[in-house]
Image: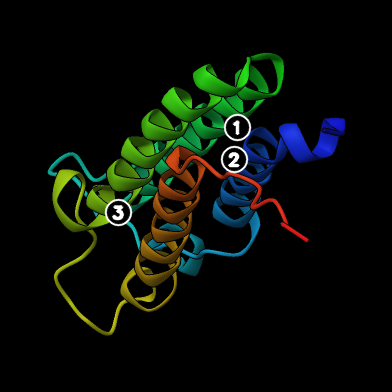
Amino acid sequence: MSLPARKWRGLLVLLLGLVTVIAAQFFLEVCGDAGHMLETAKGTLVPMRCHWSEQGLKGIGGLVAGIGVVMLLARDEAQRALSAVAALAGLLMILLPLWILPTCTMPSMVCNLSYKPGAILLGALVVLAGLLGMVRWKRVSQAA
């Protein structure tokens, strides 16, 4: 079996982790990117909670990319086990804007229109890749 055929799990997870970090940094907008800030009692401006949710998504994306690197160096059985860890990290990516660090309560805010759906989609892709990596693929031999 060739190297890419054996290491597809790690490459897929690494790619999804990198895409998550890049998308969260450059493409998924939060309220702070649109100029919306909270004013404290002392008059200072601080980012809204969706900003911290975005920072958490970048961290989880980095974790997923790290899992992908370890998967590239691991054997097949360990790759399947690490795929389960990647799927759990993807579930964490989904729960982050929904429950752990929720976005703004106003549905028309930019974080609910850009960041939240993007984070859920990226998390679902990581969960799917993790579940796909857990499956044992066997080559069906052709009997002539």
One can see residue 43 in this view: yes
Q: Alpha carbon of mark 3 to alpha carbon of mark 1: how far?
A: 16 Å
Q: Alpha carbon of mark 2 to alpha carbon of mark 1: how far?
A: 6 Å
In the picture shown, does residue 50 fall above or below 115?
above
Q: Alpha carbon of mark 2 to alpha carbon of mark 3: how far?
A: 16 Å
Classify mark 3: residues with Cα within 10 Å, few (<14), some (14-19) or many (20+). many
Q: Is residue 121 left or right of residue 41?
A: right
One can see residue 45 in this view: no
Name the residue: 68% across, 45% down.
Answer: 15
Element type at mark 1: helix
Foreground residue among 61 and 114: 61
Relative image position of residue 47 (x, y in whole percent) = 34, 48
Q: Residue 30 carries which label?
A: none
Element type at mark 2: helix
Element type at mark 3: helix
Q: How many labels does the image show?
A: 3
Q: What residue is shown with label 2?
A: 13
Q: Which residue lies furthest to the right in this view?
A: 2
Kind of residue sitting beneath label 1: Ala
Q: Which quadrant of the structure image shows residue 107?
A: bottom left
Q: Which mark is residue 65?
A: 1
Relative image position of residue 71 (x, y in whole percent) = 61, 23
Kind of residue sitting beneath label 3: Ile
Q: Which residue lies furthest to the front in this view?
A: 144
Name the residue: 61% across, 64% down.
Answer: 27
User: Of discs 2 and 1, which sits in the foreground?
Assistant: 2
Q: What residue is shown with label 3?
A: 94
In the picture shown, does residue 23 fall above or below 134?
below
Kind of residue sitting beneath label 2: Val
